[in-house]
Image: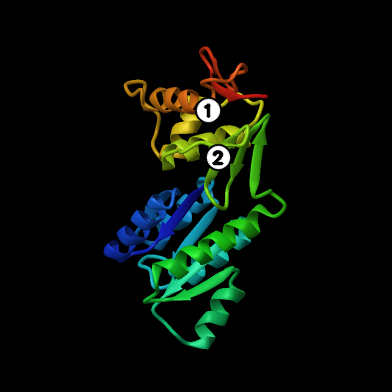
């Protein structure tokens, strides 16, 4: 899941980014409304966290413009203002939720997860490929009923593969979706994590699920 944070106060943006990354999300940050509007219109995000008081272009205008552009990405507005009219203005501009600063990160994260689930609609809370099961809500993975402990990145990588069951995914797509970086041929970080996933998931089973498609990428397939 990729989230765009548009926040001009760098210490707040950094705090939000770190917390979201620790929760397993890929995060981009923009420090003014123009940059945020540009990124939201050119990149694909699952959620936008948007401050109201922004330089160059205020958050309400950014929100209105995105909705005019037919961008339906959920928007969570953050603001220091605690006035009912301001909240109404934000929601009428097209925001999906509203949170007043200062806020507890636990509440913020709960709202983020609600909006992401709402956007996913009928997407199930579990994924399955053959006898491999992933519980997205509880971050739990099992194969043939046996628990498989995974690191955050291993879980996100496996989730990405399972969401593309039967499809070849390129290293560039994995790098940008899971690691939030542009792929470089000088790094083997993806190959290392694939190796670890294979060791944990396929070792001891007659039929391996994770496949290497030479020259193209990886695929998980029953």
Q: Nearer the viewer, residue 163 or 144?
A: 144
Whether residue 74 is visible here, answered yes or no, is no
On the image, numbered disc 1 is attached to which residue?
201
* Residue found at the very far left of the displayed protein: 11
Q: Label 2's element? A: strand
Q: In which quarter of the image is residue 103?
A: bottom left
| Residue 166, horizontal then vertical, whole percent | 66, 26
Q: Gap between marks 2 and 1, in whole Å?
A: 9 Å
Q: In this view, does 210 lie above or below 127?
A: above
Horizontal and vertical percent for residue 5? 42, 58
Query: From the viewer's perspective, is residue 197 above or below residue 214?
Result: below
Q: In this view, does 155 lie above or below 45?
A: above
Residue 171, horizontal then vertical, whole percent: 47, 26
Crowding at dot 1, Cα within 10 Å, few <14 / some 14-19 / many 20+, comes out as many
**Picture quadrant where residue 56 is located:** bottom left
Q: How many circles with numbers are drawn on the protein?
A: 2
Residues tagged 2 and 1 counted as in contact (Cβ below 8 A): yes
Where residue 175 sits, quadrant-wise, is top left
The residue at 54%/45% (across/down) is 140
Left or right, 160 with reference to 165 = left
Of label 2 and label 1, which has the lower sequence position? 2
Question: Could you tell me which residue is drawn at 40 percent across and 29 percent down?
Answer: 183
The spot of residue 191 in percent (x, y) is 41, 22
In this view, the residue in front, 102 or 128, is 128
Residue 120 visible in the shown view: yes
Residue at 54 percent across and 75 percent down: it is: 90
Q: Is residue 148 above or below residue 198?
A: below
């Amino acid at each position: 899941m990729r989230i765009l944070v548009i926040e001009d106060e760098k210490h707040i943006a950094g705090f939000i980014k770190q917390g979201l990354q620790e929760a397993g999300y890929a995060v981009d940050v923009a420090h003014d409304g123009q940059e945020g509007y540009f990124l939201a219109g050119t990149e694909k995000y699952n959620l936008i966290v948007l401050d109201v008081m922004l330089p160059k272009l205020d958050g309400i205008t950014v929100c209105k413009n995105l909705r005019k552009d037919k961008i339906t990405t959920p928007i969570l507005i953050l603001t220091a203002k605690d006035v009912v009219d301001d909240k109404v203005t934000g929601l009428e501009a097209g925001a999906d939720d509203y949170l007043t600063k200062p806020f507890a990160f636990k509440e913020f994260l709960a709202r983020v997860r609600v909006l992401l689930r709402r956007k996913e609609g009928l997407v199930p809370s579990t994924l399955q490929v053959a006898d491999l099961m992933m519980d997205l809500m509880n971050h739990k993975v099992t194969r043939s009923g046996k628990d498989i402990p995974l690191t955050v990145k291993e879980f996100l990588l496996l989730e990405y593969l399972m969401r593309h069951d039967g499809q070849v995914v390129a290293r560039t797509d994995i790098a940008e979706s899971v690691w939030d970086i542009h792929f470089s041929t000088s790094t083997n970080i993806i190959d290392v994590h694939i190796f670890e996933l294979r060791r944990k998931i396929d070792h001891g089973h007659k039929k391996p699920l994770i496949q290497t498609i030479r020259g193209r990428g990886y695929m998980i397939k029953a």
